[in-house]
Image (cartoon, coloured by chain):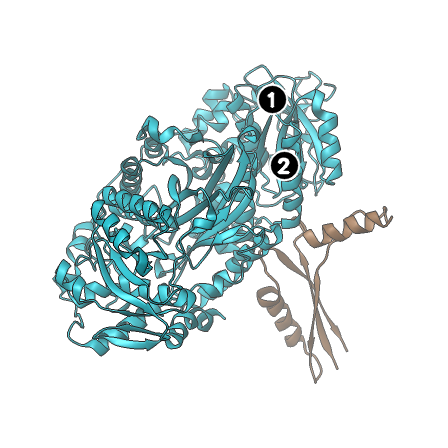
Chain colours: A brown, B cyan
Amino acid sequence: MPKIIVEVMPKEVLLDPAGKSVNNALHRKGHKDITAVRIGKRIELHFDRAVTDADIAEAQQIGESFLSNAVIEDVVSVTVQN
Amino acid sequence: MALFKKKQKFVPSGVDTTAEAAVTPDKAQPFVELGLKLEEYARIREILGRRPTSSELAMYSVMWSEHCSYKSSKIYLRQFGEKVTDEMKKDLMVGMGENAGVVDIGEGWAVTFKVESHNHPSYIEPFQGAATGVGGIVRDILTMGARPIAVMDQLRFGAPNDPDTARVVHGVVDGISFYGNCLGLPNIGGETVFDKVYQGNPLVNALSVGALRHEDLKLAKASNPGDLVILFGARTGADGIGGVSVLASETFDSTGPAKRPAVQVGDPFAEKVLIECCLELYHAQVVAGIQDLGGAGISCATSELASNGGAGMRVQLQKVLKRDESLTPEEILMSESQERMMGIVPKKDLKAFEAIVNKWEVEYSVIGEVIGEDRLYINWGEEEIVNVPPRTVAHDGPVYERPVAFPSYQDALNNDTVHSRGLYRANDNSSELAAQLVQIVSSPNQADKGWITNQYDRYVGGNTALAQPDDSGMVRVSEETGLGISIATDANGRYCYLDPYQGARLALAEAYRNVAVGGAKPMAVTNCLNFGSPENPEVMWQFKQATAGLADGCLELGIPVTGGNVSFYNQTGDVAIHPTPVVGVLGVIDNVARRIPSGWQDEGHNIYLLGVTKDELDGSVWSEVIHGHLGGRPPVVDLGFEKQLGDALAAASEQGLLASAHDLSEAGLAQALVECTLRFNMGARVWLNEISERDGVDRTCALFSESTGRVLVSVGREDDVKFVGLCEARGIPVLRIGVTDNSGQLEIQDIATWQLSDLRGAHEATLPELFG
């Protein structure tokens, strides 16, 4: 089934507490070369037909207005997987 | 210190230095965009004898904003410190002006409490706005040397059926529960009010209370030259840059979405570690002064610590640990990254300090030292970017006596009463009165708030003695003796709109009564004054009236204001919110085991109404819910009687005469009866005719009047004579109006009989239906 994948990340300038915690945990495990961790989310929109350019534009719009919180998050990519 | 090389030569670079400022006096600066008026900018130039550097401009602009400087409210807030007697001050260890007031509660214990607004951030980003509101007020309490022991939130939302209200309600409630629950602090009460005046500008006020031993008291000051300035806790990022000046001091319309600055994101687990770390630092006595970083970040902490201590400071800004290396010096100075503290540590104690923060895995950096000179120097590497007298930044900001005007609508509003309108009363129609009662107790403002408060942890810590839906929240402070404190907060925006002077006194009276009915002795007052724009003379009149009413009221009751917060510019477009001065009263109880429950628990107890019922329906819930009316004058408040009533309750409680006590306020006796039965599911039979006969009021008034100075109590039969005698001896009007029973019903004679399950259904379903 074709799907559109929307990826959302916390805004670069804002604190990402989950990412920070994971980074600290990795350091304790010895992975000292990792300098930062940031955790976002991946949302899949499934279709039972071929995905059109209009669908992608709509997914972008849904991503920015509904799937993410524009005040603290950015939609970093909208891609199609067939 | 090697950090600071003396170097004042002009070096061109990306950074605006004091040396550069001296040679480029005419450089245009964006002071208007930073919220400064031309006169204010001119005054900065006069203080410095040159143009400010961009870093200095950032500091002054944020510290001179309404939110930080209280420039419009200062002249009115002074009366809270002036209208006091020595008697009122005797238990006050720290009064107004510090991060929070501190009250001696005996046994070597003290408590500190404060309420603060986080209104504007919570509209833009409800979850993080409300969460960081909790985090901020908890750090204020921590700064005084106290362990935070409870929080409360005072919320005002728009109309319940407006689609945007659900967004704000869900975000705010989730944010509060997330942050508070993660910290492990019980949320012991608060307020929730819906009114369309808050549609584009919800109020999110957060209160915290903390307890400390007398010797642990800490103050935010740096007074010993040579002491180190240490920034510890979270790293500094680009959170909420300018948030404090732009978000808190401007209306949304003028900034618009495009210029919305980054909000702050909170990390409650980091805060929890910071709390434990700070408490250990205090006990080890390695910090000479401490300040939390909230609004205005490092700008505020450095200038206030230096100004409070009558000293100066040298800071190397490049030593600040950053989350993002690209931050400019101006951004670092203004950043509002959460979970940060600034400590003043004597050099000899640095090792001990390091051992403790390392144990808690809290990052820190020594960013400067205290100096004897009355000057705040901040360097960026070798460049000097700030060189100012700290007092001019922190405390000697502009003070305005804004124009005040009696509102043009006020007389018409006051003349438009329930009587002049001839609003219909269903006195002769029992089934209609019964329907009104159900309609009122299930209206969003009077309905059970469990849907909200059940999302908070009320009992974590195991010290909660009373919590919502009780009249006040009560927590135990000493596990040895049971010594505890209670807090109630109140504000009725509708009353305050009708008469801000009386409205503030009514809020005070209600909070005082709510503390008293729990069995505690009211001791101190805090406030959060939410108003419209100070640039509107009619709003300024409301503010002037409300502050005078509150200060006069506290003097009459003999309890001091220990601190508070002012939030202006609460409006959507040109329409200001109702003036909403949230008043919090702190009470002390020698043993929380002696608390008075708010509901009935035993059958066969007599129900007494204390106080007198008058025909006071203007501004009432009845006028709003049944008639959609707001006009006239709010109920009369007699603070002398409130005190008498409080003393009588305390005496009755000490003699163990009271099985329960519940305050009468919004929606009057009807609301109190429903809440008393539903609290522990105990039925009752009640009659109104004696109220009507004695007080000369109709049945609508007997049920719904909001006359003040009234309390509903239940008393065991064996204590009847004693209790009535006590009330009569103290001049408290007392009338037996009913008996509790196990019928599973509430019967109000000649009106209706309800199954408690039906009443509960009506009272508890409203909020889940709207938001669940």
Q: Quadrant of residue B371?
A: top right
Q: Is residue B221 left or right of residue B536?
A: right
Q: Secondary structure at mark 1?
A: strand
Q: Position of residue A48 (x, y in %)?
A: 70, 85
**Percent position of residue B434, x then y:** 26, 74
Nearer to us in this view, B280 or B123:
B280
Q: Is residue B120 visible?
A: no
Q: Secondary structure at mark 2?
A: helix
* Cα gap from disc 1 to disc 2, whole angstroms: 25 Å
Give the numbered dot on residue B313.
1
Q: Residue at x 57, y 30 (%)?
A: B216
Point out the residue furthest to the bottom here.
A48
Q: Which mark is residue B370?
A: none
**Is residue B227 depicted above or below B294 in this figure?**
above
Q: Amino acid at mark 2?
A: Leu
Relative horizontal placement of residue B764, taking residue B627 as reference (left or right): right
Callout 1 crowding tier (Cα within 10 Å): few <14, some 14–19, many ≥20? many
Q: Locate residue B643, reporting x and y percent.
A: 28, 42
**Quarter where residue B362 is shown:** top right
Q: Residues within 10 Å of mark 2 (few under 14, many from 20)?
A: some
Q: Is residue B408 above or below residue B662?
A: above
Work out whether mark 1 precedes mark 2 in sequence or the reverse, and give the earlier one: 2
- Which label sits in the foreground, 1 or 2? 2
Q: Amino acid at mark 1?
A: Met
Residue B749 in the image: above or below residue B171: below
Chain at tag 1? B
Q: Which mark is residue B279?
A: 2
Whether labels 1 and 2 belong to a single chain: the reply is yes
Measuring from the top left, give residue B337's x and y in whole percent: 61, 43
Whether residue B288 is visible here, answered yes or no, is: yes
